[in-house]
Amino acid sequence: MHGAYMLREMAVSAIRTSKLSKDYGVGRGLFELDLEVGSQEVFGYLGPNGAGKTTTIRLLMGMIRPTGGAAYVFGLDCRRDSVAVKRRVGYLPGEMPQFGSLRGKEVVAYLGGMRGGTDPKVVRSIAERFDLDLNRRFREYSSGNKRKLGLLLAFMHRPDLLILDEPTSGLDPLNQQEFYELLREARAAGATVFLSSHVLSEVEQICDTVGILRAGKLVRVARLQELRDAGETSLEEIFLSYYSETDHHQKALPE
């Protein structure tokens, strides 16, 4: 029975969307997204600012209501089963919520309690890796340290799925490398990773598959190994091919 359950779990996609849409009007939003992310995959979600990456993530987390379509995490409906989804997901928002005068350790305890508890050893280990002082108040943290706390909150309960919105924004190169290593360890332990980014070099380093979003529509999904095997087109060339020089998003493209 246990074996049958495991096989069923493996067969269920970590993320699946069907015609998922959020229309903000005047051509802004997300439109009829059909996406599937397999278990233990590291999926890079690419696009400049305003393409719809954060909207997708907020829909997956049940934070906003879709205009149409549906989204599922491990077979759970992201709207109807949002509480159950959140228990299985480690989420890093693009902008951290403000925790004011709470100390880092108090934020950890508060959110850890909502998720059914965390292992203090895991919390301590991640904090040490990022050189993050959990005794300081949130409002005293630099933007980089707030990002580190966000990563700690996402990883600390060893979730089945990590949903990370621009995870290395504000991190120095040393801490970026620490994040990449933490990501590899989580994936080796069985986690699936869905991360949004506009940094192509980062995506090429850590992702298995990429999806390219333009003006709210998914225009390409490609496995990076297949692109490497083809040896003809770089990820940057593919990405830029979807954006003309006159595109108003062009200024948001990576250097």
Image (cartoon, helix red, strand yellow):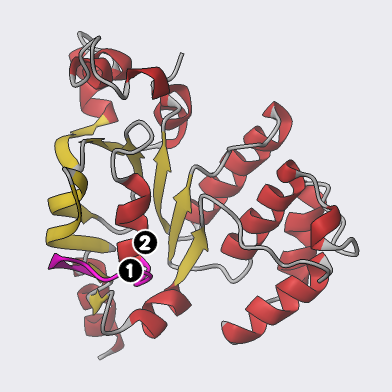
Q: Is residue 117 visible?
A: no
Question: SS of the residue at dot 2?
Answer: helix
Which amino acid type is shown beneath numbered disc 1? Ile
Residue at 28% from the left image edge and 72% from the top image edge: 74
Q: Nearest to the eye among marks 2 and 1: give it.
A: 1
**Residue 98 image point, x, y percent:** 67, 63
The residue closer to the viewer here, 17 or 214, is 214
Question: SS of the residue at dot 1?
Answer: loop
Q: Residue furthest bottom?
A: 1
Contact (Cβ within 8 Å) of mark 2 with mark 1: yes
**Rendered image quadrant of residue 180:** top right
Which amino acid type is shown beneath numbered disc 2? Arg
Residue at 35% from the left image edge and 80% from the top image edge: 82
Q: Which mark is residue 58?
A: 2
Instruction: State which region is magenta.
Output: 61-71
The residue closer to the viewer here, 14 or 103, is 103
- CA neighbours of label 2 inside 10 A, class few (<14), some (14 to 19), many (20+): some
**Residue 171 image point, x, y percent:** 67, 36
**Rendered image quadrant of residue 225:** top left
Q: Earlier in the sequence, mark 2 or mark 1?
A: 2
Q: Which residue is mark 1?
A: 64
**Residue 253 image point, x, y percent:** 39, 21
Q: CA distance from mark 2 to mark 1?
A: 6 Å
**Residue 4 image point, x, y percent:** 21, 83
Residue at 48% from the left image edge and 29% from the top image edge: 202
SS majority, magenta: loop
Tell me if 170 is positioned left or right of 165 in this view: right
Is residue 247 positioned above or below 68 on the image?
Answer: above
